[in-house]
Each structure stands twice: as C-alpha cells, then as structure tokens.
C-alpha cells in the first residue's frame, strides 16, 4: 500500500512519467506483448516543421466534429487485443476518439489527419490541455471550464464514472471558465505552431463550446438536423467495449498518462489533408518509415464513403498501399446503416465499428469489388 501511494504521489508531482509504461488494466490478460519503447521527443521546431511539411490546404466538411458521433467507437477494443495490435505508428481522423485507440495499442507515434484545418486547431487545444493537466480530473475540469480540483492522491484511482459525478457536482463559474480559457489559449500560443488571429479565435470558440454545453455536447452538422442517436460527451466518456468494460483513454489514469506523455514528446502530430490527396497520407508514410516504424492502425471512421463519392478511392487505396504497414496492421472504420443492417452491430447502437486487416483491404481493393461504401463495409472484416 505504501508503495502504491508513493507512486500516486510521484504522479501528482511529475504529471507524466509515473504511469506511462503501464498497460491498460482492462485488457491485461490479452496484452502480454512486450511494452512499447517510446521514441525520443521532438523539439517544438521539429514538430511544427513536420506539421507544415505534411499538411495540404484545408478543405470543407459540413460538421463541427468537436466530438465523435460514433457511440460504438470502443467496440473494436477486444479485437485489437485478440490480434495483438501494439506499438508502431497510428494514423487516424477526427477529434479525441483517436486517443482511446492510441492508448489501447500503445502507439509510439500518432498522426491525426483530417481534411479540415479546424481539426488541427482542435488538436492544438487538446495538446495544451494535456500539457497543463497533471491528471484526468484536472484535464476534464480545464476542458469543460469547471473548477480545478485540488491535488489529491485519490483522484488517480477514481473511475471515470466518479470523475463525471464530480463534474456534475462542480458546475462551471465565470471565474473557472475565464481561468480555463485564458490559461489554455496562452499555452496554445507556446506550442510552436504559427497561428493567425483567426486561428486563435477558432480555438477559443471551440473551447467555449465545450465549456457552454459540457457533458451534454453533441456532434452537430451544418444544414442537417441533429440525430437522436448521436451520443453526448457524457455518453462517450462512459462508453464500454463489447464486454461491458470502460475503455476510453479517460477510463484509467495509466491510459491518460500514456497519451499525455506522447503529447509531451510532440509525438501526436496533427496534419491537414485529404485521405485521397497527393501529399498528406503518403508523406505520413514516408515520415513513419524515417522514424523506423510501421503503421499498426489506420482509423478512417466513415471518411472512405466521401472519398468514394468524390471519385478518389483509387488514389486513396494506392496511398494505403504505399504505407510501411505492420504485418498485423489493421484499419478501423464505421458504418451508419442503422439497426439490422450489419452482422457486427451491437443491439441498441446505430453505428457499427469494423476492423479489417490491411491485407484484407488491399486484396478487396485490387479485386475491384468495392464500387460503394456499402460494398466496402460488407467485405471481409475481423469477427468481433
């Protein structure tokens, strides 16, 4: 007990190193593979240079994407464990759901790719939140503009449900919102990325949206009515895998600290780019190869649907082919067909999370059988 308390106290003092090497408790039996070795940190200048070198001009998508609309996002965790997907490089789209996949697979470097520059700006907000927060409790408080709780060794052992209850009991105040907004925006400006006044205004607006709606925040689209099945931020934080186990990056202190350490080392790299573009995805592949790593996970949500509609699937598949892929590397995608439309669905969920090996995807792509996104999601995938 004394040893455990000493570890927790060290965590509160250092904010990074104490728990970073631990593996996710919920999957310890299925994750006997050796722990990954973290890459050396990148300087702020190198981080900024990679972001700039890899990024394409920003494009448009008709959603704010502040949080995911994939309530099923954790349903592939058990399959990732069963296949032993660990280490290497991670490439993913969207906001913070990628952090849960990164934590679960203990990715050594991550590239967060999205066609919208707003997504890059949101990830700079997350990066500043990680930098200022020593624990999950502080991260959640600063993210949602709540009063930051005093340091307490008990915080790191609390469940995410207990932390959510704590947020419910500590509503935001004018002072707590002002402190969170001012301190995080100041931290964003110290990250080394050149930001315009418009960029800073956008980041501040994103943070205000989180603070205004809090745990009730939902994914929204421009010109489309909200869907009743879209989860709230509360739903996403309290989601479970298919076995009913809490599995987000905020469900354990060890997972949070792992992602925090990657952020501290500047190894979570946001990139603006189209999956079917000529530069970003291929450039990420070259960068991964230069680091001596291979891609273990490519998370694409349902972005392939839009790639297909725009006629870019062949270019996208060629870019995937060009990646330095891990032998057991996988792709994660989402399907929004609704109840009764896919054999891998979980009752009560509108979205379905699917996992396919790189080899399976490329075999199907070469066959020419993927004429629609519906055909893609019904091609062979790993059984959950």
Image (cartoon, rainbow, N blue to C red):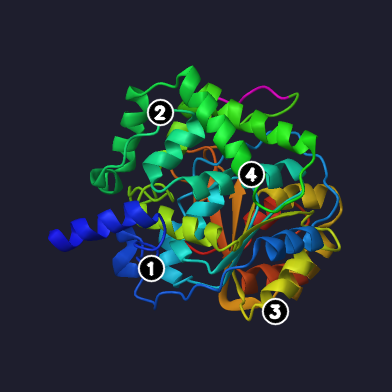
Circle 2 residue: 147
Q: Which of the pair 189/354 is nearer the observer?
A: 189
Q: Which disc number belongs to residue 21?
A: 1
Q: Residue reaching furthest top?
A: 174
Circle 3 residue: 290
Q: CA distance from mark 1 to mark 3?
A: 24 Å
Q: Earlier in the sequence, mark 1 or mark 3?
A: 1
Mark 3 secondary-structure assignment:
helix
Q: Position of residue 200 (x, y in %)?
A: 72, 36
Q: Which of the pair 153/308 is nearer the observer?
A: 153
Q: Mark 2–mark 4 contact, CB under 8 Å?
A: no
Q: CA distance from mark 3 to mark 2?
A: 43 Å
Q: Mark 3–mark 4 contact, CB under 8 Å?
A: no
Along the horizontal axis of the image, is 380 left or right of 224? Answer: left
Front label number (3 vs 2): 2
Front label number (3 vs 4): 4
Circle 4 residue: 188
Q: Earlier in the sequence, mark 1 or mark 4?
A: 1
Prevailing SS of the magenta stretch: loop
Q: Mark 1–mark 2 contact, CB under 8 Å?
A: no
Span colored in magenta = 224-228
Mark 2 secondary-structure assignment:
loop
Q: Which residue does the image show at 77% across and 49% down from the upper left?
A: 194
Q: Which residue does the image show at 53% across and 44% down from the upper left?
A: 129
Q: Position of residue 36 (x, y in %)?
A: 45, 74
Within 10 Å of disc 2 (Cα), the crowding (few <14, some 14-19, many 20+) is: many
Front label number (1 vs 2): 2
């Amino acid at each position: 007990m004394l040893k455990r308390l000493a570890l927790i106290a060290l965590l509160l003092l250092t904010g990074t190193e104490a728990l970073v090497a631990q593996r996710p408790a919920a999957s310890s039996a299925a994750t006997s593979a050796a722990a990954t070795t973290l890459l050396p940190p990148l300087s702020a200048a190198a981080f900024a240079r990679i972001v700039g070198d890899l990024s394409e001009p920003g494009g448009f998508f008709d959603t704010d994407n502040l949080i995911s609309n994939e309530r099923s996002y954790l349903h592939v965790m058990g399959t990732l464990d069963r296949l032993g997907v660990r280490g290497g490089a991670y490439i993913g789209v969207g906001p913070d759901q990628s952090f849960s996949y990164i934590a679960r697979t203990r990715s050594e470097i991550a590239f967060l790719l999205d066609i919208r520059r707003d997504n890059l700006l949101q990830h700079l907000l997350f990066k500043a939140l990680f930098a200022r927060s020593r624990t999950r409790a502080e991260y959640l408080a600063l993210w949602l503009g709540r009063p930051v709780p005093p340091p307490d060794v008990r915080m790191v052992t609390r469940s995410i449900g207990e932390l959510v209850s704590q947020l419910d009991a500590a509503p935001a105040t004018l002072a707590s919102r002002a402190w969170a907004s001012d301190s995080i925006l100041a931290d964003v400006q110290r990250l080394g990325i050149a930001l315009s006044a418009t960029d800073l205004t956008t980041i501040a607006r994103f943070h205000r949206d989180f603070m205004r709606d809090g745990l009730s925040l939902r994914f929204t689209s421009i010109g489309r009515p909200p869907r009743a099945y879209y989860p709230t931020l509360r739903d996403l934080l309290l989601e479970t895998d298919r076995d009913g186990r809490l599995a987000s990056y905020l469900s354990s202190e060890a997972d949070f600290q792992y992602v925090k350490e990657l952020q501290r080392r500047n190894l979570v790299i946001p990139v603006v780019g189209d999956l079917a573009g000529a530069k970003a995805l291929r450039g990420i592949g070259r960068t991964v190869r230069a680091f001596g790593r291979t891609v273990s996970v490519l998370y694409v949500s349902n972005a392939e649907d839009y790639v297909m509609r725009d006629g870019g699937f062949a270019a996208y598949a060629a870019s995937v082919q060009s990646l330095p892929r891990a032998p057991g590397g996988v792709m994660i995608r989402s399907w929004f067909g609704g109840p009764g439309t896919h054999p891998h669905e979980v009752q009560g969920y509108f979205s379905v999370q699917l996992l396919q090996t790189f080899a399976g995807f490329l075999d199907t792509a070469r066959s020419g059988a993927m004429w629609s996104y519906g055909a893609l999601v019904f091609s062979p995938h790993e059984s959950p």
